[in-house]
């Protein structure tokens, strides 16, 4: 689950999310749900599913693309 600000999703628009490992291999994530956080109109919750091709725990960088703009690659760690 991700949280982002400044997302005003209009009908027909989508968000794409991907992660990148330390070897610069990219993995697109399936976006399962996008919705505003109740009582926080400026905050959007994005639910994604990790692909089965990611077998290893470790450090990754995650980014989302919205209206042709890709955000910063934030560091995350995957622990199973």
Image: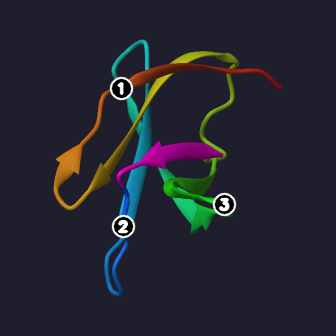
Q: Position of residue 14 (x, y in %)?
A: 36, 70
CA gap, disc 3 and disc 1: 27 Å
CA gap, disc 1 and disc 2: 20 Å
User: What is the span of residues highlighted in magenta in the rendered image?
Assistant: 1-6
First along the sequence among labels 2 and 3: 2
In the picture as drawn, the residue positioned furthest to the left comes out as 68
Say above or below: 70 vs 80. below
What is the number of the mark on residue 39?
A: 3
Q: Residue 47 lies in magenta, yes or no?
A: no
Q: Residue 4 lies in magenta, yes or no?
A: yes
In depth, the one of 25 and 68 nearer the eye is 68
- Asked if disc 1 and disc 2 are in contact, CB closer than 8 Å, the reply is no
Residue pointed to by mark 1:
73
Instruction: Judge from the rendering whether residue 56 lies leftward or rightward of residue 11; answer left or right.
Output: right
Residue pointed to by mark 2:
8
In the picture as drawn, the residue positioned furthest to the front comes out as 39
In depth, the one of 64 and 29 nearer the eye is 64
Q: Secondary structure at mark 3?
A: loop
Identity of the residue drawn at 38% across and 61% down: 15
Say above or below: 36 vs 55. below
Q: Secondary structure at mark 1?
A: loop
First along the sequence among labels 3 and 1: 3
Identity of the residue drawn at 37% across and 27% down: 25
The quarter holding residue 38 reads bottom right
The quarter holding residue 62 reads top left
């Amino acid at each position: 689950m991700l949280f982002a600000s400044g997302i005003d999703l209009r009908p027909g628009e989508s968000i794409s999310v991907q992660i990148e490992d330390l070897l610069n291999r990219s993995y697109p994530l399936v976006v399962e749900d996008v919705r505003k956080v109740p009582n926080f109109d400026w905050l959007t919750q994005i639910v994604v599913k990790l692909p089965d091709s990611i077998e290893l725990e470790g450090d990754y960088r995650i980014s989302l693309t919205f209206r042709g703009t890709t955000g910063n690659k934030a560091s995350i760690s995957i622990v199973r």
